Image (tube, helix red, strand yellow):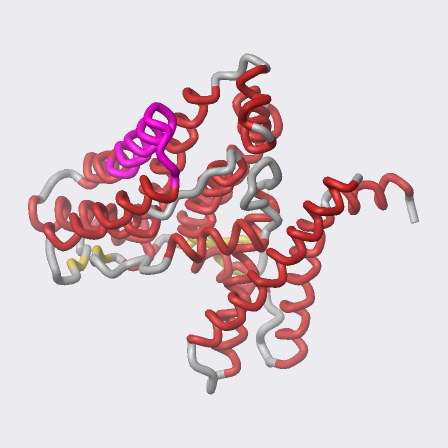
Amino acid sequence: MNNRFVLFIRRNISVSITIILFLLMFAIGSIMFRGFFSAQVFYNLFIDNAFMMVTAAGMTMVIITGGIDLSVGSIIALTTMVVAHLSEKVGINPIIVIFMGLSVGTIFGLVHGVVISIFNVAPFIVTLAGMFLARGLCYIISTESITINNALFQKIALFKIPFINGTITVNVVIAIIVLVISYIILYYTKFGRTLYAIGGNEQSAMLMGLSVRKTKVIVYTINGFLASLSGVIFSLYMLSGYSLHAQGGELDTIASCVIGGTLLSGGVGNVVGTLFGVLILGVIQTLIMFQGTLSSWWTRIAIGILLLFFILFQTFFIKKTNVN
């Protein structure tokens, strides 16, 4: 085998395992269930999880710095409520509504970043407060589900883009663009390298003259913006706003990042692994749907087992790295 290929696999062992696991699960589904092996089933993994890919891209950046954000699920729900309420109850132009929806998470992210970096409060505590605040604001807007009947939203949501033996949606295109931009930011910009430096060793990053506080504020703001963008995508996917949307979404997002090879201790991770982490969660749900008799809670059981496996693997990986 080519030495460069072997070296590449060793350097990206966690991501490689995630990709192999996804291919294996998809192959098992194709063997077990008739109609599983099709382009549209594969595209549906992207269509059903486009919102998760967007918020997971932001979460990956946050975790790389050694932080965490527990508020993304609530911000997604709040954004769907803001979009649905303003477009259906208030009658504001949908384009303006989308911009207002995007500002919700951006403001939350900015506040999180400022409190975490300036006041040196643990990200877990700050974003936990943000999670409760955002979910509570949903109930102030309405306790009922608000259906979106706006013509523009309906047109965008139902628009199908023909793609190799199937169709995809606008949400998928947005998710792919976000992932590509996130990849470029992480690997080809000074900001991306600063994120890895902070996650590797924050004190060393400060001694190197890197702007740690400013970078943290920016990364949490970006994450908040992407959570709101995810909320807009979810609004288009469900064509409704509801306080209970994306319940537990923050945990699914974190699980996708960890399964994709992002270390919770920071300093390691990329959006390619996160993408396949999301796809693994999606293929588990698809397998259960094709099986037909299993409860959807088996998805949680499978995710729990996978998460435990990848955390144990990461622990082993960190110990081996420290020894070396």
Q: Residue at x 40, y 49 (%)?
A: 171
Q: Name the side, left or right, on which 171 lies relative to 316.
A: left
Q: Who is closer to the viewer here, 238 or 220?
A: 220
Q: Residue at x 21, y 57 (%)?
A: 243
Q: Classify the position of the C terminus by image quarter.
A: top right
Identify the residue at the far left of this view: 90
Q: Who is closer to the viewer here, 264 or 185?
A: 264
Q: Name the side, left or right, on which 14 lies relative to 146.
A: right
Q: Residue at x 11, y 55 (%)?
A: 142
The number of numbered discs placed on residues in the rendered structure image is 0
Q: Quadrant of residue 98?
A: top left
Q: Who is closer to the viewer here, 1 or 205?
A: 205
Identify the residue at the far top of this view: 209
Q: Tell me where the magenta segment starts and ends, as one range.
A: 104-123
Membership of 118 in magenta stretch: yes
Residue 177 showing in the rendered view: no
Magenta span: predominant SS is helix
